[in-house]
Amino acid sequence: LGLIYLFLWFFMPDFSEVMTWATGSITYLWTNFFLLAFGYLFYRDYYENSEKADLRNMLCYVFLGFLAGQSNEAGACTMIFASMIFVVFSLYNKKHIYLHQILGICALIIGTATLILAPGNRVRISEVEASSGASNVIKNYLFRFARETFYGVMFLMIPLAICIGLYFIRQKKSWKDKEILFAILALVSVYVMTFSAGFANRIYQLPLLLLTIVFSISIDDIWFNTENPIICKMDQSDKFIRNIKRSITAFIAAMMLMVVFEVVAGTIYAESRKSFFDRQMIYYHIYDNEGALSGNGIQN
């Protein structure tokens, strides 16, 4: 759990817009609860063999589905894609699709439609179309695709590399692994914005969240898989287990102290400049970036 928190802290793109800005945190952080809660229902149904639901559970699917659809464009469209995967794999594996699941998916689509067709969103779409009306449609979408790729690499390169490294440490790998599913959803959540009228760097919080799930599944498999030779070796030596646990505990504690220092130093620095606290993991040199922690995104 400590590693998951640290993973999110150090790699969260546009931290202030997602975490501390009230409007941004409601749209891009808090609504993740509805997205993940709704997604978990189908994840549980598929892997634990769902059964017919009563009226209360049916309403839960509909309620969470509608709110997940109204969350944000990237999250809602990604969840629709995930629902399609659920239906396809259920049919392929001859699993029964129940009424409450169908109603939940319908509520998700309706919620997404009300989000996209909302009056405020319509105004934003018209403004974007007016600014890019003279450009060629193909060139416009090629630019958007390149833009998503560039910022996706910039914000997700290191966490993705960590996830890939952990995945290949595992002993057994298959295209059916859960990590592959969440990695695909992370990729979809990046490129779904190619078809959106608006764009902001903060949309990359959802791909990071999905990569964090990949990260946690791999860590869990490496640590608790009894067929892993590392675990077998640990079972043979109590001293080895204690040393490993102490090393990991010391590492997590040191990183959390680093976080505390960042928060205190960043808050004091921001207050002295009458500004706000922000942090970003920057993978390139910015000449006006300076502060208590050089290179950690404390900007004027």
Image (cartoon, rainbow, N blue to C red):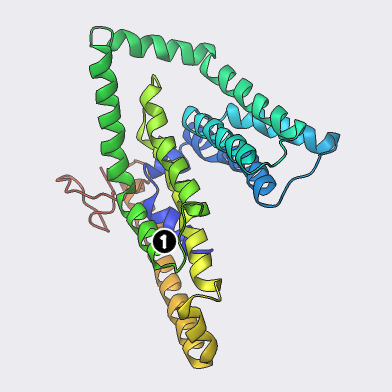
Quadrant in the picture for the C terminus:
top left
Q: Does residue 149 appear left or right of residue 126 in this picture? A: left
Q: Is residue 94 left or right of residue 277?
A: right
Q: Secondary structure at mark 1?
A: helix
Whether residue 179 appears in this view of the structure is yes
Count of numbered badges drawn on the protein: 1
Residue 165: % across, % down: 35, 62
200 vs 86, left or right, is left
Name the residue at 49% across, 92% down: 239
Q: Position of residue 218 (x, y in %)?
A: 48, 62
Q: Is residue 250 above or below residue 283?
A: below
| Residue 273 appears in the rendering | no
Relative to 231, does residue 189 appear above or below in the rendering?
A: above
Residue 74, position as x, y percentages in the image: 46, 31
Residue under the point 81% across and 40% down: 52
Write the residue at 54% across / 86% down: 235
Mark 1: give few (<14), some (14-19) or many (20+) Cα within 10 Å: many
Which residue does the numbered mark 1 point to in the structure image? 167
Work out whether residue 278 or residue 216 is closer to the camera in this orientation and state it: 216
Residue drawn at (79%, 38%) of the image: 57
Q: Estimate the x, y position of residue 80 in percent, counting from the top left.
A: 55, 30
Placement of 282 over or under 60, stated as above or below? below
User: Quick one: 20 or 44, which is closer to the camera?
Assistant: 44
Q: Is residue 17 above or below residue 133?
A: below
Q: Residue furthest left?
A: 287
Q: Amino acid at mark 1?
A: Tyr
Is the N terminus in the top left, top right, bottom left or bottom right quadrant?
A: bottom right
Depth check: 56 or 285 in front?
56
